[in-house]
Image (cartoon, helix red, strand yellow):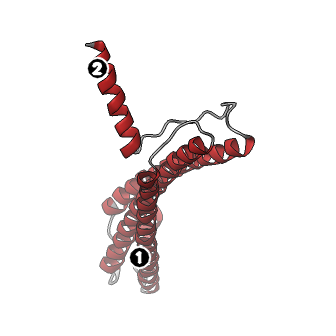
């Protein structure tokens, strides 16, 4: 019974290795790896660590923007003839900042996915070059290509969100200048905590 289970389990592992994206991690201390291969693997591992740190930072920024949005939405209105417009523009700017921060987090997630896909590919290529293991390379390369496409799409979405954020900020400052020029009540601008 145990022998049959080992064969089935071994066959299943072989199938996952041949058709899936599972790749064994390479150790940088493996004596079978030459120095240039170790550097290549180390660079790919560093890219994952850096991408993860960027994603974590984008997550922290998103939380800060969400907190700022809550304060902006609960801030008092401006008095005067341009007060309603100024409040609306301030809220639109805050919402566009949220959209941009959300897009930045999506981009960071996509970049992390790409660096992980590249790392798996580099592990597999290095293992095959050094006769350590054999992998089915087309699915691994396809995963990198798919992750790269996701990065490109998210980068474009982030660019559009940033442009909208900058446009909303310009509109807010125009509304603010108009409010201040007409001697409107500017105290909510100065008293809101960011």
Question: Which residue sits at x=43%, y=55%?
Answer: 138
| Residue 1 position (above or below residue 157) | above
N-terminal of the pair, mark 2 or mark 1, is 2
The numbered disc on residue 5 is 2
x, y percent for residue 186? 43, 73
Q: Nearer the viewer, residue 42 or 49?
A: 42
Among the 4 quarters of the image, the one containing residue 95: bottom left
Q: How many marks?
A: 2
In front of the other: label 2 or label 1?
A: 2
- Secondary structure of the residue carrying numbered label 1: helix
Q: Position of residue 75 (x, y in %)?
A: 34, 62
Q: CA distance from mark 2 to mark 1?
A: 59 Å
Q: Dot 2 lies on which element?
A: helix
* Residue at x-position 50% and y-position 36%: 24
For label 2, the crowd category at 10 Å Cα-Cα, with few meaning under 14, some 14 to 19 and many 20 or more, is: few
Where residue 119 sits in the image (x, y, percent)? 53, 47
For the residue pair 13 and 52, the one nearer the viewer reads as 13
Give the residue pinned by disc 1.
Answer: 164
Vertically, is 181 above or below 130?
below
Residue at image coords 41%, 45%? 21
In the rendered image, the residue lying farthest to the right is: 35
- Residue that extends furthest to the top in the rendered view of this protein: 1
Would you say residue 193 is visible in this rendering? Answer: no
Residue 127 x/y as whole percent: 57, 41
Q: Are marks 2 and 1 in contact (CB under 8 Å)?
A: no
In the rendered image, the vertical position of residue 114 relative to residue 183, given as above or below: above
Number of other residues with Cα within 10 Å of mark 1, as a class: few under 14, some 14 to 19, many 20 or more? some
Q: Residue at x 53, y 37 (%)?
A: 133
Q: Is residue 172 visible?
A: yes
Q: Nearer the viewer, residue 105 or 176?
A: 105
Q: Which mark is residue 154?
A: none
Image quadrant in which the N terminus is located: top left
């Amino acid at each position: 019974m145990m022998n049959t289970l080992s064969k089935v389990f071994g066959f299943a592992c072989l199938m996952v290795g041949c058709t899936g994206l599972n790749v064994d991690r390479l150790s940088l201390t493996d004596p079978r790896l030459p120095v240039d291969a170790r550097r290549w693997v180390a660079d790919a591992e560093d890219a994952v660590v850096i991408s993860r740190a960027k994603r974590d930072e984008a997550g922290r920024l998103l939380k800060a923007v969400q907190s700022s949005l809550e304060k902006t939405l609960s801030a008092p209105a401006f008095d005067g003839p341009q007060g309603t417009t100024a409040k609306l523009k301030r809220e639109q700017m805050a919402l566009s900042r949220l959209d941009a921060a959300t897009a930045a987090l999506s981009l960071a997630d996509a970049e992390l996915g790409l660096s992980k896909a590249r790392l798996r590919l580099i592990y597999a290529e290095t293992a095959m070059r050094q006769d350590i293991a054999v992998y089915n390379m087309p699915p691994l390369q396809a995963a990198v290509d798919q992750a790269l496409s996701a990065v490109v799409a998210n980068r474009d979405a982030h660019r559009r969100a940033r442009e909208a954020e900058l446009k909303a900020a310009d509109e807010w400052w125009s509304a603010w200048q108009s409010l201040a020029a007409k001697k409107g009540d500017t105290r909510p601008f100065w008293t809101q905590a960011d």
